[in-house]
Image (cartoon, rainbow, N blue to C red):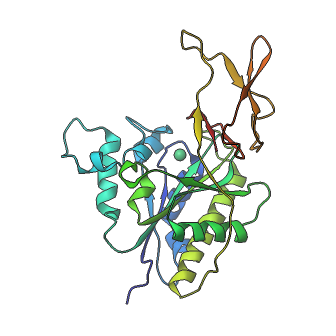
Amino acid sequence: MSPPVSQVVVVGGTHGNEMSGVCLAKHWLQDPSELRRKSFTADILLANPIAVERCVRYIDRDLNRSFSHELLSASASESDSYEVKRAREIYQKYGPKQSSLNFVIDLHNTTSNMGTTILLFKGDNFALHLANYLKTKCVDPSFPCHILLIDIPEQGHVHLQSMGKHSISLELGPQPQGVVRTDVLARMKVLVNSSLDFLDLFNQGTEFPSFEAEVHQVLHKADFPRGADGEIQAFIHSELQFSHSRQRSANIIWWAIPEKELFFRNSQNAGTAWDMELNYTVDIL
Ligand SMILES: [Zn+2]
């Protein structure tokens, strides 16, 4: 009888300039022995090889926004972008969800100081158990673990990880794009190995007790303050830049020239964290 989790895929290079996943995927493609466990051997996938070769996030469009039902099910055409073609190839190999229970681990870096952020879909309690396992087993004050829930209805899923019945993305930072930080790379390697350990323990019948955990989710996205011409008029406040701070209630998040501090008022009075990713606006978590 096959184990409950028989198909596991570890994905690097979904974004071609996020180097921890790129380096690990290249290494494991050469020598996958580290991905072997008693109950399964994880597959390794370099998701966007042309973007990796050019050291860019993507070629035509973001691969990690190309796994929508609409794009995957549309009939193929010559004019399809590289990433849409690639998403269909990957989905054919590892989807659909009805096949054997599978688990996707997608590896990312961020320019933001998010430490170890584990992204999973709200309601994926199996992935939440894995995230909690990482949080307790892989303690590292330099890159503390945060759990971030992706709260989108299933029909709106566009991320690569959504092709798995269960999945996590590991988002490690801060690390500039196209740059390898060895400590971040080593941290990513430990986290992937521990994730595989968890899945193997589960396959062998280990029971994981119930737990309480702090989780984050995006409540609001704030664009930079802009003038009538669309030009950015204020910047991330120095007290927040490069920090992963949590504050309550009203917060100063912008600094403008001439010197002026601007507030963001948090109407839900929730704890807030800040994800100032180079590729995004400011996410208020
Ligand atoms: Zn990424």
- 50 left or right of 188 in image: left
Residue 46 visible (yes or no)? no
Residue 267 drawn above or below residue 157: above
Q: Residue at x 58, y 86 (%)?
A: 206
| Nearest the eye: 113 or 282 | 282
Residue 102 in view, yes or no: yes
Which residue lies most toward the bottom here? Answer: 1
- Identified at 50% across, 65% down, the residue is 124
The residue shown at (39%, 85%) is 2
Q: Is residue 104 left or right of residue 277?
A: left
x and y, in percent, of residue 70 in the image: 28, 46
- Whole-percent x, y for residue 129 in the image: 59, 71
In the image, 281 versus 56, the foreground residue is: 281
- As displayed, is residue 227 above or below residue 33? above
Looking at the picture, how far across and down is residue 244, in whole percent?
74, 44
Instruction: Give the position of the C terminus as an image quadrant.
Output: top right
- Vertically, is 225 above or below 156? above
- Say how many tags the image has: 0
Q: Is 11 positioned to the left or the right of 61 in the image?
A: right
Residue 267 in which image quadrant: top right
Residue 219 coordinates in the image, percent (x, y): 59, 43
